[in-house]
Every structure is written in C-alpha cells, then in structure tokens.
Amino acid sequence: MASLAAVDFGFLDSMSVRPVETVLKNAVRQAKAAADSAGKERALYFDAEGMQFVLRDFESAAVVAKMPLYPKAENAAGGKKQEESEMTDSDEPKNAAPPVKIVFEPVIPEAENSFESSFGTLDEIPCLRFYPDGASSECIIKISTGGGPERRFRLDPFSEVPVEIKE
C-alpha cells in the first residue's frame, strides 16, 4: 500500500485530455491509499483556478499530491506556452480546456431534514475527507464541463471509486 501512495502521477500531464471522471476516480484512489499508508487523515480538494485536484494532509494542510485535469498549456513543438499569434479572437489559447465545475454535496441521512452546522444548512462541503481506516466522506459529486449537462457521482464511505448516478 505504501508504494501506491508514493506513485508519481506526473506522467499524466503529458497525456492528451482525459475525461474529468477518470481523473476524479484516480484522485479518490490515490487519496484512499495515501490515508491508509500514512495512517493519517487526508483531504481532497478541487482547485477550479488551477484545474486540478489537490490532496492535502488534513491536520497540517501540507500538499501531498496534485492531479491536473488537463496537460499544462504548452504546445507540443517546443514546450513553450502559446504565443500571442496563436491566440483566438476571444484572447483564449487554441485548444483551451473547457471550464469545469465540481461540487461536493453532503449526503443527508433520510432521518434528518437538513445538515445543520453553526453556519446554517450546508449545500456544499469544501473537500472529501479520507480516513486511515478506509472510510471517507459520504457525498454526491456534481461535475459540469464546458456548460454541458451536470453529471452526478455518489461517493459512499467504503466504496473504492465514485459511481455515476443514472436517473
């Protein structure tokens, strides 16, 4: 298990664009393995600005790993960022990655009408938490890419990967 947590996923940066749900599933697997091997709680966040999942130690907030959704904005020819001549009329790079929105929504037990906190009802939680015993936050993960339809995944506390909810 320790070898799984130490795996460098940097090679994924060089791959072509991967589906967001594939990166999500890999991030969840890595977070579960990291919590188990370190014997410490881990937290998985989605950084919308950086278009990446960030795995942190829950207590210290130290970054354990980063898992980008898309390869870095470099062209294949020379590894240089796109030049102004390659920009479109909208001032965005050609082949720009579509915007992604990911929301972690808490699962509310049926016995309760709402999930209350000192701040009121929670519609979203900031991160997924993974514990050394293999448990994790129970939530619904909502993903929308490029303004397309929203897809929903359920993360059960003891499941291996998020599973898409078909309605």
Image (cartoon, helix red, strand yellow):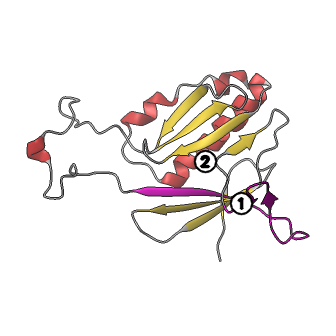
**Label 1: how many Cα within 10 Å (few below 14, some 14–19, many 20+):** some
Mark positioned earlier in the residue sequence (2 or 1) = 2
Q: Is residue 107 left or right of residue 92?
A: right
* Residue on which disc 2 sits: 25
Q: What residue is drawn where x is 59% and y is 57%?
A: 103
**Label 2: how many Cα within 10 Å (few below 14, some 14–19, many 20+):** some
Which of 71 and 11 lies nearest the eye of the viewer?
71
Farthest bottom residue in view: 167
Q: Secondary structure at mark 1?
A: loop
* Residue on which disc 1 sits: 122
Which of 162 and 87 lies nearest the eye of the viewer?
87
The region drawn magenta spans 99-123
Q: Is residue 138 left or right of residue 15?
A: right
Based on the displayed image, in which of its 4 quarters is residue 61 positioned? top right
Which of 108 and 157 lies nearest the eye of the viewer?
108
Residue type highlighted by circle 2:
Lys
- How far apart are the alpha carbons under marks 2 and 1? 24 Å
Q: What residue is drawn where x is 71% and y is 22%?
A: 2
Q: Is residue 105 magenta?
A: yes
Based on the displayed image, in which of its 4 quarters is residue 31 positioned? top right
Q: Is residue 155 visible?
A: no
Give the x, y percent position of residue 151.
56, 66
Give the x, y percent position of residue 129.
73, 42
Q: What residue is drawn where x is 53% and y is 69%?
A: 150
Residue type highlighted by circle 1:
Leu
